Amino acid sequence: MRAKILSIIILLLLVIVFTVQNAEPLLIELWFWNFSISKALLIFLVLAVGVILGLIAGSLAPRKKSSPLPPGPPSQLL
C-alpha cells in the first residue's frame, strides 16, 4: 500500500514538472482557424486520442478463435 502511494506521488510530481516546463502557449493555424493552446495540453490531448483510437482498432480487429486441443495423450518431446 505504501509503495502504491509513493509511486502515485512520484508520478504526480513528474506530471507537474512536465506541465510547468511545457506551459507556454503554442499557436496552431489550421486553414481558416487560429487558436492557442499550451504544449502540455496538446500533448495530453494527442495521447488521449491515440489511446482511444488504439482501443477502437483493437476492438474492431478480428480475433482468432482458439481451437481446443484434440483429446488424447499429451505429445512427448524427443
Image (cartoon, rainbow, N blue to C red):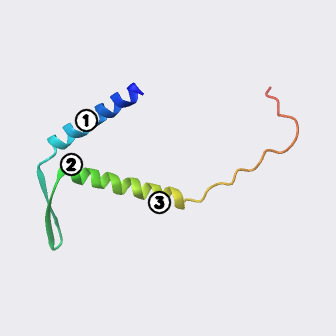
- Asked which quadrant contains residue 77, the reply is top right
Report, in whole angstroms, how far the alpha carbon at label 2 lies from the one at label 1: 12 Å
Residue 59 location, x and y as percent? Answer: 53, 58
Q: Which mark is residue 40?
A: 2
- Measured as percent of width and height from the top left, residue 43 is found at 25, 50
Which mark is first along the chain, 1 or 3?
1
Q: Image point 53% across, 61% down: which residue?
A: 60
Q: Which mark is residue 6?
A: none
Q: Secondary structure at mark 3?
A: helix
Q: Residue furthest front?
A: 1
Cα gap from disc 3 to disc 1, whole angstroms = 29 Å
Inter-mark Cα distance, 3 to 2: 24 Å
Q: Quadrant of the N terminus?
A: top left
How would you rate the neighbour count of disc 2 (Cα within 10 Å): few for under 14, some for 14-19, many for 20 or more? some
Q: Residue furthest right?
A: 72
The residue carrying mark 3 is 56
Instruction: Name the residue rendered at 55%, 59% in the picture.
Output: 61
Quadrant location of residue 17? top left
Seen from the viewer's position, the closer of residues 71 and 11 is 11
For the point 30% across and 55% down, the residue is: 46
Report the residue marked by disc 1: 14
Compared across the picture, whether 31 is left or right of 53 comes to left
Vertical order, 65 against 21 (above or below): below
Q: Amino acid at mark 3?
A: Ile
User: In the rendering, at what x and y percent does residue 36 appear?
Assistant: 13, 60
**Residue type indicated by callout 1:** Leu
